[in-house]
Amino acid sequence: MQGIFTFFKTQTNAWIQLIAAVIVIFLGFKFNINKTEWLAIIFAISFVIVTEMLNTALEFLTDLASPS
């Protein structure tokens, strides 16, 4: 959980992606998308956020290995 909090605390892109996800979910309700489309939306949102978290973890690891 600490890593997730650190991710959202230190990464501006995380907030942008979270806001985009909320907008997409809102529009999904507005346009009444079906279950298959919801599954695709949830998968895409999860994939983007998890990938960004992995990228952030690798950046932090690189900073530890090579501070300069």
Image: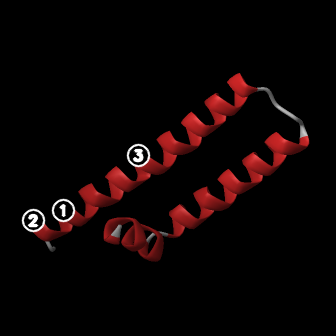
Residue bearing mark 1: 61
Residue bearing mark 2: 65
Estimate how packed mark 2 is, as few (under 14), some (14 to 19) or many (20 or more) residues with alpha carbons within 10 Å. Answer: few
Left or right: residue 14 compared with residue 34 = left
Left or right: residue 35 compared with residue 57 = right
| SS category of the residue bearing label 3 | helix
Estimate how packed mark 3 is, as few (under 14), some (14 to 19) or many (20 or more) residues with alpha carbons within 10 Å. Answer: few
Frontmost of labels 3 and 2 is 3
Q: Which residue lies furthest to the left in this view?
A: 65
* Residue depicted at 65% across the width and 36% down the height: 41
Q: Do the residues labelled 1 and 2 touch (CB within 8 Å)?
A: yes
Give whichever of discs 3 and 2 has the lower sequence position: 3
Q: Nearer the viewer, residue 11 or 24?
A: 24
User: CA separation, marks 1 and 2?
Assistant: 6 Å
Rendering quarter of residue 5: bottom left
Left or right: residue 6 compared with residue 33 = left
Which mark, residue 4?
A: none
Give whichever of discs 3 and 1 has the lower sequence position: 3
Q: Which residue lies furthest to the front in this view?
A: 35
Q: Which residue lies furthest to the top in this view?
A: 36
Q: Considering only vertical position in the picture, is 42 above or below 54?
A: above
* Residue depicted at 52% across the width and 70% down the height: 12
Say what amino acid the circle numbered 1 marks. Answer: Leu
Residue bearing mark 3: 51
